[in-house]
Structures are given as structure tokens and as C-alpha cells.
Image: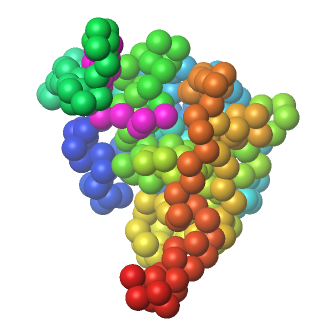
């Protein structure tokens, strides 16, 4: 078996001290040298980890000045791609994992909601994988098929969401970094402080406040997932299909700065 001795379960909690010596050496070299997957030789350690990467990740990371903001963003990008690809590799190596998704339960409508002679509701589609991010299930167009669904789920477990970037008009830039969480929360941009804290952690510093999974700061820039690609915020163009008829606008209170506190104040004043 290739040297990727990590289980899907451990993806959520693995620390730097738990990496195999060869993987730790790769990450150590990434933080002090040029973080190019090719020059680091990680493709030889875990073959196919970087398959299906059509954009110029290697080229642009090589051009970044070590220690610069661009360098740090590309380093996080490489780490996200690496974690995604390890999850893909494990899914494929274990033939879809030890736990297969259960078929969905049939839809049962209460009698009072049914009209006379109403046709039965359509059956629910079976889940393609047991582990998934609700916005990243377009496996038919993914390079690794269903395995990539699990890869996006691994990103959520490790980073708090799928790692995205402002790719600019040309599609190859790395201007800002964003996180796409689950649960209907909006995509949010990481602050410079969050990026610096995370890079410091990778360099052996203290764990960032709030843990290593990113959370939106109160006044972070937020983007609706239906409009993110129009704003050049993505990692790969194939990762999502935006529906022509977009869902109605529902915003969680946490995505509105000051809203939660305002509601608490209102409840306290009104006695509710």
C-alpha cells in the first residue's frame, strides 16, 4: 500500500506530530523552501495525489517569493489540495470506505397533505457517498468521481469548509482565500490575522485562537455561494454547477454582523 498511513477517521484530528516521517519532511520543506508539489517530490510519495489539477498551481507557487503573502496563500492551497487528495486516495484504496451509504427512506406524506388521486412523490436519490459537503456533489464531472466528494468533505473537517480563492479575471491568480462551510452558511474570506496565525501554527507555533478549523469573523466579507463563481471565487471551475433557478435567499443570523447580539438585546428587553 502507498505510504499514506492515515484513515478517513483520523483525517479530522491528525496533527503534525502524527504524520509519517516522509510526509512531515515534505511539509517542513514546504514552509522553508518553494512549495511546489513537483519540487517537493510528493507525487512520488503518494502517486496521483495531484491528478486532475488543471490550473497552474505549480507554476504560480514557484513564482511566489518565500515568506510573502502570495507564498502563504499558495502554501495553504497546497495543504488543502494535499488533504483532499489523501482522502480521495483512501476512498479509492478501500473501495469506497468501510461504511457504505444507506439507501434513503421513502417519502411518507401525512394524509391531510395529500390531494385525492395525487400521484406518489418521486423517490429520493441515494447518496453517492456517506461523507459529503452539501454543495459539492457533482461527481459526474469530477476528475476522481465520487472520491472527490469525500475529498471536499475532508476539507470541511480539517479547515472548516472547502478552501477557495479569488482567482481573478484570468483564473490563475491567488488574491484572497475563502472558506465554504456547510449548513447553509455563506462563503467567508479569511482575514490577514487568520492567515498569519495559521501559517505560524504550521511553522510550529501555537494553535490559532478557536482551533485550526476556520470560523468566520464577525465582520468578515461574505459571499453567497450562488454568486461566488461569478466573482471568480472558486478553486476549480468544475467543482460546482450553479442552478439556473437559484434558491430563495435565506440568510443565517450569524452571517449578519451584529444580528445575533441585536436579537439577544431585543429578547432581553421584551422579556422573551
Relative to residue 18, is residue 180 drawn left or right? Answer: right
Decide: is 22 above or below 115: below
Dominant secondary-structure state across the stretch colored magenta? loop
Whether residue 40 can be seen here: no
Q: Name the spot of residue 212 as percent of width and height, x first.
A: 43, 63
Decide: is 185 above or below 106: below
Residue nearest the observer in this picture, 207 or 113? 113
Write down the region rendered in magenta.
122-135
Residue nearest the observer in this picture, 220 or 257? 257
Q: Is residue 217 magenta?
A: no
Q: Name the spot of residue 117 as percent of width and height, x first.
A: 29, 9
Q: Residue at x 48, y 31 (%)?
A: 136
Colouring: rainbow
Q: Residue at x 65, y 65 (%)?
A: 220
Q: Residue at x 14, y 28 (%)?
A: 98
Instruction: Report the quarter where the N terminus lies.
Output: top left
Q: Residue at x 54, y 20 (%)?
A: 52
Whether residue 192 can be seen here: yes
Relative to residue 254, is residue 71 drawn left or right? Answer: right
Tell me how many marks there are.
0
Decide: is 77 above or below 43: below
Query: Quadrant of the rendered structure where residue 94 is?
Result: top left
Which residue in the rendered view is the most extreme toward the right? 169
Residue nearest the observer in this picture, 111 or 161? 111
Relative to residue 113, is residue 77 drawn left or right? Answer: right
Q: Is residue 127 magenta?
A: yes
Instruction: Report the quarter where the C terminus lies.
Output: bottom left
Decide: is 81 above or below 200: above
Q: Name the spot of residue 79 as percent of width and height, x first.
A: 50, 46
Q: Name the spot of residue 61 as percent of width and height, x first.
A: 69, 42
Amino acid at each position: 500500500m502507498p505510504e499514506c498511513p492515515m484513515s478517513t477517521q483520523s483525517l479530522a484530528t491528525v496533527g503534525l506530530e502524527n504524520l509519517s516521517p516522509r510526509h512531515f519532511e515534505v511539509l517542513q520543506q514546504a514552509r522553508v523552501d518553494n512549495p511546489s508539489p513537483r519540487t517537493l517530490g510528493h507525487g512520488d510519495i503518494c502517486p496521483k495525489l495531484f491528478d486532475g489539477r488543471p490550473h497552474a498551481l505549480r507554476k504560480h507557487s514557484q513564482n511566489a517569493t518565500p515568506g510573502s503573502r502570495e507564498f502563504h496563500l499558495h502554501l495553504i492551497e497546497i495543504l488543502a489540495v494535499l488533504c483532499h487528495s489523501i482522502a480521495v486516495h483512501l476512498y479509492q484504496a478501500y473501495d469506497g470506505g468501510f461504511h457504505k451509504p444507506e439507501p434513503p427512506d421513502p417519502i411518507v406524506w401525512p394524509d391531510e397533505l395529500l390531494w385525492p388521486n395525487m400521484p406518489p412523490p418521486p423517490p429520493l436519490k441515494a447518496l453517492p457517498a456517506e461523507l459529503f459537503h452539501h454543495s459539492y456533489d457533482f461527481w459526474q464531472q469530477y476528475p476522481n468521481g465520487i472520491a472527490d466528494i469525500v475529498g471536499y468533505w475532508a476539507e470541511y473537517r480539517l479547515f472548516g469548509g472547502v478552501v477557495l480563492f479569488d482567482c481573478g479575471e484570468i483564473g490563475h491568480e491567488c488574491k484572497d482565500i475563502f472558506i465554504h462551510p456547510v449548513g447553509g452558511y455563506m462563503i467567508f474570506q479569511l482575514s490577514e490575522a487568520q492567515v498569519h496565525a495559521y501559517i505560524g501554527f504550521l511553522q510550529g507555533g501555537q494553535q490559532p485562537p478557536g482551533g485550526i478549523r476556520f470560523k468566520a469573523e464577525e465582520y468578515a466579507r461574505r459571499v453567497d455561494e450562488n454568486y461566488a463563481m461569478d466573482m471568480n471565487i472558486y478553486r476549480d471551475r468544475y467543482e460546482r454547477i450553479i442552478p439556473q433557478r437559484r434558491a430563495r435567499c435565506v440568510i443565517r443570523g450569524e452571517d449578519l454582523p451584529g444580528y445575533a447580539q441585536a436579537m439577544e438585546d431585543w429578547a432581553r428587553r421584551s422579556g422573551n
